Image (cartoon, coloured by chain):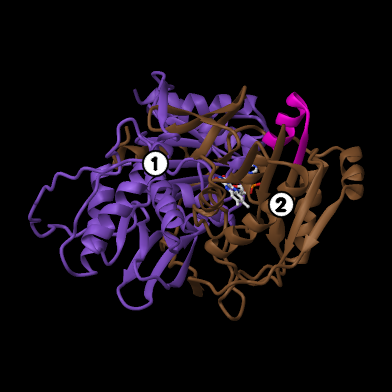
Amino acid sequence: MRVLVCVKRVPFTGGKMVLAADSMALETKHLGFTISPHEECGVEEAVRLIEANGGESVVLTLGPAEAVEQLRDAMALGIDRAIHLRTDGSEWDPDATAAVIVDAIRTDESATGLFDLIVFGSESADSGGYQVGLRVAHALGRPAVTGLKGVKPEGGSVRCEQEVEGGRDVYVVPMPAVVTVKEGLNLPRYPSVPGRMRAGRKPVATSAPARPAARLELVRLVVPPGQGRRAEVLGSGAAAAPAVVDMLRKIGVV
Amino acid sequence: MDQSKASMETLTLARRFGGPVHSVRIDAIEPFAPDAVAAILALVADNLNASAVFAAGTDRGNDVMARLAARTGQPFAANCVDAEPGSPVSVTRFRWGGSLLESALLHSPRPLITVAPNTFSAEAEPAPIEVDVKPFVAQLDETDLVVRVSDHIDTAGGRVSLAEAKVVVSGGRGVGSKEGFAIIEELAGLLGAAVGCSRVVTSAGWRPHTDQVGQTGTKIAPDLYIACGISGATQHMAGCKAAKRILAINSDAEAPIMLNADYAVVGDLREIVPAISAELRKSR
Ligand SMILES: Cc1cc2nc3c(=O)[nH]c(=O)nc-3n(C[C@H](O)[C@H](O)[C@H](O)COP(=O)(O)OP(=O)(O)OC[C@H]3O[C@@H](n4cnc5c(N)ncnc54)[C@H](O)[C@@H]3O)c2cc1C
């Protein structure tokens, strides 16, 4: 079986959002970067599917030169090779992102054959557009199921479980198919040292597509006003317990 | 999610765009088949010459609107908290699950917009709507029925559900271990609360992901959220800031959560949490 997983490099923000001077991006000077969490689970799932069924797994990203770190991270977990669509670090809207991913998939598939499954995150951690996977699926004419917590190939089909209120909805669609997944699908493994070493030698195919004009055009980022809460300190240590219970009583919890 | 509340929020925003507001039920097709719903929406929007299409930013709302966007080749802005008509349309939308906002322009003859749930204040008393039900016969293509719900698994098993609980007792890295959650469970039991946790805890395998609160976990709005040994990272707060009240129990008086909490107890949660449980038992 052949599986492609598409990931996005995002900053690991801490207790506060700090904007760059032009308000067009986060100030990331002091931040680390990671694969967006939903897609981390996508990577793990792709690795497990190939371990179980044999075949090839490929990771793809659209991002700046540094995004090769996230591609190496994915390959350290067991992905076989990578496709890097390199940008100058500027914003790409979801529509443009999907368009170049479609081109890259068509090029790769014409050389190596169809991907049975193309895996995306439900939404990226930063821009949260909820659409790249569905746009790619539509362009390729493949069925797509979103927000999955379970992905199980069964013969020529894939059984998809989607978390909904009170349980899970099940979809069974024929492959090749596109799925978008959520954190909680699995518990991603930590990379091993040999895994990291192997990742350094795995191939990365790089190209730099031109950026189409944005139709969802970022104007500026704004940090939402805080909730203005200032904690009333009820005490410290175990001695604070009576004050806590008084508070619980006052607000009607007990 | 309260579907009717989400619908009211959506309607309130849609009204700003003038003209009559028409609506299509997101569950128009039973069992749910998102491509078919998108096909119906596309047809209805064309027939009515709709100036914009809105939906609630629920999982299904975002799913169907993205499919509509793909099939009509139009841009789509998910999880907006504001939208102003014009050409282009100006929107304000969620990034990072609401920890950051984005002002953006939507360049489209028919803007597609979903409304972030629980953020937009719906009109308190919405103006009465003239309901004009038009039977609508859609010719559905077989390919639009390939993706459809074929089964449902019930997982709600007697426990207080995290999303619905009035009180949530949550533990972070400060709890220290899987076993450390015994005191969190005990306090939750006494308060009839659900147990929550941070992502550090699920990544470590101390709790299942279904307990995770935050941007990539469950978003909750309880009456009281008790955060024990949780620093208050933006992605965690994205899941619990809708709580009416937050009590933080943390050994670090300067932890970011202190700026987001209403009450705080400073110190070691391994002493404080059992002391609160003991006090509750005493006062029974
Ligand atoms: C894209 C993205 C999405 C994310 N989504 C989520 C999400 O959905 N949910 C989520 O929770 N996180 C999420 N995170 C991770 C988030 O950024 C933080 O890393 C995480 O919330 C930190 O968890 P924590 O507060 O338990 O740990 P830490 O930040 O390590 O904080 C531990 C706290 O415990 C206190 N402490 C330690 N020992 C004790 C003790 N004995 N008694 C009392 N206090 C003690 C410390 O003072 C500290 O404040 C996400 C991150 C990214 C990049």
Q: Residue at point 31% right, 58% down?
A: B54
Q: Is residue B109 left or right of residue A112?
A: left
Image colour assigned to chain B: purple
Residue B125 image offset from top left, x and y in percent: 12, 57
The residue under label 2 is which amino acid type?
Leu
| Labelled pair 1, 2 in contact (Cβ < 8 Å) | no
Chain bearing mark 2: A
Residue A54 magenta: yes
Image colour assigned to chain A: brown
Image quarter (top left, top right, bottom left or bottom right) of the N terminus of chain B = top left
Mark 1 and mark 2: Cα distance apart in space: 26 Å
Q: Residue at point 51% right, 26% down?
A: B185
Q: How many labels does the image show?
A: 2
Q: Which mark is residue A60?
A: 2
Q: A56 or B274, which is in the foreground?
A: A56
* Image-quadrant location for residue B154: top left
Residue B171 image offset from top left, x and y in percent: 56, 37
The residue under label 1 is which amino acid type?
Pro
Q: Label 2: state its secondary structure.
A: strand
Q: Residue B34 carries which label?
A: 1
Vertical side of B60 occupied by A187: above or below: above
Residue B255 image offset from top left, x and y in percent: 59, 54
Q: A40 or A3, which is in the foreground?
A: A3
Q: In this view, does A31 lie to the left or right of B280?
A: right
Residue B116 magenta: no
Q: Residue at point 63% right, 51% down?
A: A36
Cβ of disc 2 within 8 Å of ligand 1? no
Over which residues does the magenta segment extend? A44-57
Q: Quick check: can you spot residue A243? A: no
